[in-house]
Amino acid sequence: MTTDRADLARLEGWAKVTGTARYAGDHHPDDLAHAWPVPATIARGDLAAVRTEAALAVPGVLAVLTHHDAPALALPDDGDPTLAVLQSPRIAHRGQIVALVVAETPEDARAGAAAVECVYRPEPFDVVLTDDHQGLYTPAQANGGHPAVRERGDFDTAHGQAAVRIDRTYRIGPLHNHPMEPHTATAQWDGERLTVHDSSQGTNQVRTTLATLFGLAVADVLVISEHVGGGFGSKGTTRPHAVLATMAARRVDRPVRLALPRDQLPALTGYRAPTVHRVRLGADDDGRITALAHEVTTRSSTVREFVEQAAVPARVMYHSPNSRTVHRVVRQDVPTPSWMRAPGEAPGMFALECAMDELAETCGLDPVELRIRNEPAVEPDSDRPFSSRHLVECLREGARRFDWSRRHAAGPRREGRRLLGSGVAAATYPVLIAPSTAEVLARPDGTFLVRVNATDIGTGARTVLAAVAAETLAVPPDRVDVEIGRSDLPPAPLAGGSAGTASWGWAVHDACTGLRRALTDRGGTPLPSEGLRHRADTTDAVAAGSTFARHAFGAQFAEVEVDADTGEVRLRRLLGVFAAGRILNTRTARSQFTGAMIMGASMALLEHSTLDPGFGDHAERDLASYHVAVNADVPVVEAFWLDEHDEHLNPMGAKGIGELGIVGTAAAVVNAVRHACGVRVRELPIRPEALLPRLPRLPHLPG
Ligand code: MOS
C-alpha cells in the first residue's frame, strides 16, 4: 500500500473487501425485529379500509401500523411531505406506503405484508407527461434556487434572422438511482433517546428531521452512517424508511430494521424526473451562436414540487447574445422525483450537447471546433468572470488522446456488419460548497485524530480527508485517523452536490492549520495525556462567497459500433478529460470519474423506465428489468484531468468531481451513433428497436 498522499489507498478498503465494514443493515442489536412495507396498488384515491387481522395471524408478526394508529408526525410547513408516512388515508401515487408490518424475521414481515387487505376508493389519475399538458406551469424557481426563466437579448428575432437554425426536441424518461445497498435503517429507542443506523448521505440532516418529526431534542437523536453503499442523491435527504423504522421500533418497543425491497425504491426514494427539452440554436455561417433557447418540460408529484433544473447549464456553456432558458412543470399522480447524480446538468447537457452536434453538422464544422468558437469570455448569464475555465483545453487534450483527427481523415468506418463512429460532448458541473466544522486532536504518541461528520458513500471521503490532514499537518498519512459518519461528530454537510470534499476538507484544513500553529507555539513541550485539540468552522468563510462564476468542465469522447443487422449499439471506448481544480487523490478521483462516465453510458444505452399509463407506476422496478451497465458494456473507460490551479475555491484548490463525469457522456454516445450510422437519436436510451428501421441497408459483405 502506498503512503503517497495523492495516491492513498482507501482506508476502509480492507474492511470492505473482507466484509467487516458494517452498513446500516449490518447491525444486529438483541431482540431485533424486521419491518416490511405495504405499498398502495392504486395511483390516486382513498384507502377506504385496511384490514389487519389476517396479517396479525401470520406467525411471527408483531404489529401492523396503519394511518389509524401510527404515531402522529410533527411535519413542519416547510418539511418534506413525502415523509408524512401513514398519516392519512389519501393515496397520492401507486407504491405509497399504506401499512407497515413488523415481525420477528424479514420473511415473516413479508408474509404479513402480503396478508394485509386494503380496500380502496380509486379515482381517475393522470400520469402521462406530454409537452402540451394542460397542467403545465412555470414554477417560481427550478431546483437549487435557480430562476425558472431567464431571458437575455431578443431570442425570437435573433433566431428568426440566423443564417443557420436548429430546432429540436429531446426526451429522457425517468431514471432510477438504484444504489447497490437499498435504503435501510435500523432504529433503536432507549427511553426518549433514539439511535438510527441509516444508509444516508448526511446524518446531521436525518438527525434534525427525525427529532422534528418525533418531537425529540436533537441531542437525544444519534444517526450513524459509517459505510454507505452508494446513494447518487437518493440518500441525500431523509427518506421514508428511516421514519418508518423509527415508528415501528416505538410501537413494538424493540429495535427494528427496515431494508426497503428494491422494487419499492422507485416509488419511495426519488428518481430523476423525465424531461422534454426543446433546444433552438441560431448561428452565423461560421457557427457562431447568436441565439440559444433551452426550454425544459418536466413533472413532479402532487405531493411536492420538484423541478429538475435542466436548462441551467445552457446559462453557463456558450456565448450567445440572445438567450432564453425556461423550466415548466406539471404535477401528476406519480411518485415524487428527487435528486439523482448531476441533477439538472446530466439531462440538460444531453440535450444541449446533442443540439451542438446537430449545429456542427449543419454548419459543416468539426464539433470540437464549434465548441471552441463559442467559448464565452465570461459566464453568459451573469457576466461574471470564471474562477477558472479550461473547457477548450479539455477538448484539445481529449481530441489528442482520443486520436480525434483520424475521425475526419477516415470518416465513419465499417468492420464487417458493424458500423463504427465517434462523438464528442462537453461536461460542466457547478462548484458548490457548504459550511462545515471539523476537529483535530494531536495525541501524545504523535498520531492525530480528525473528527468530522462527513459521509463516505463509496467516494473515498475518509481517505481524502486523511490526506488533507496529513498534508496540512506535514505528517505521513498513516499517522492520521479519521472518524466520520456519525451525527455526534462535529457537524458537517451531506455528501451531495459534489461539495463534500471541498466543504469538509476546508474545515479539516483549517482545524489542522490551527493545530499545527498551536503545536509550533508550544515548542517541544510534551502534550498533556488528553492531547491537544483544535476545532474549525468555515461558516463565515463560506458565507463570504465569491465574485467568480465557479464551475468544473470536461470533454467526453465516445467510440461506438452499431450492429447493422440488429441495431444493437456497443460501446468501444469512452475517454474523458476534466478540469476540476486540484485532484486530491488520483485513485479515488479516477474511480469517481470513470464510475460516473459508466453511469452516463448506462443512461445512453440501457436505463429505461416506463411509467405504465394503465397502473400509474414505474414498470421496471428491479435490476432484472431496469438495466444498468455492467463490465461487459464498458470495455475501455479512461479518465484524465488537467493540472488546474484555481485560487478562488478553497484552501485545497479543489472542485467537486462526483457528478461531472456523468455529464455529457450520453450526448457523446448519441453523437457517436449518428457518426457511425447516420441515425440521429433524440430520445434516451438508444434502443435497438428504434434504431433498426432507420439503419442504412448494408449490402452483404463477405467475411
Ligand atoms: Mo448528488 S444528486 O448531489 O447526491
Image (cartoon, helix red, strand yellow):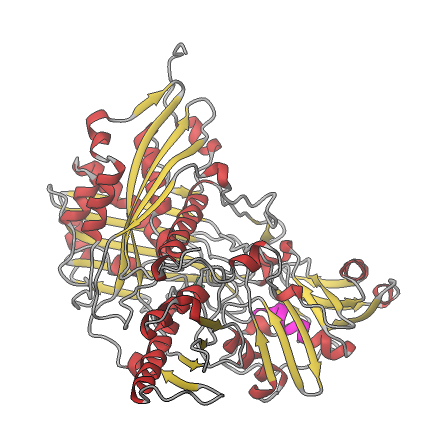
| Quarter of the image where ligand 1 sits | bottom left
Residue at (53%, 81%) from the top-left corner?
A: 488
Q: Main secondary structure of the magenta part?
A: helix
Please name whichever residue, 62 or 674, is drawn nearer the observer in this view of the structure.
62
Q: Quadrant of residue 49?
A: bottom right
Count of numbered circles on the image: 0
Q: Quadrant of residue 563?
A: top left
Q: Pick the quarter of the image with the N terminus.
A: bottom left
Estimate the x, y position of residue 542 in percent, counting from the top left: 31, 79
Estimate the x, y position of residue 277 in percent, counting from the top left: 35, 51
Residue at (25%, 49%) from the top-left corner?
A: 280
Q: Is residue 180 left or right of residue 665?
A: right
Please name whichever residue, 91 or 32, is drawn nearer the observer in this view of the structure.
32
Estimate the x, y position of residue 42 in percent, counting from the top left: 66, 58
The residue segment tinted magenta is 239-246
**Magenta stretch holds residue 242:** yes
Q: Is residue 157 left or right of residue 187?
A: left
Please name whichever residue, 696 or 595, is drawn nearer the observer in this view of the structure.
595
Residue at (37%, 83%) from the top-left corner?
A: 536
Residue at (64%, 78%) from the top-left corner?
A: 195
Spot the residue most to the top: 702
Compared to 305, does 208 lie above or below? below
Estimate the x, y position of residue 179 in percent, counting from the top left: 54, 56
- Residue 536 seen from this side: yes
Compared to 138, does 217 lie above or below? below
**Magenta stretch holds residue 617:** no
Compared to 7, does 665 lie above or below? above
- Residue 358 seen from this side: no
Compared to 244, does 430 lie above or below? above
Q: Pick the quarter of the image with the C terminus.
A: top left
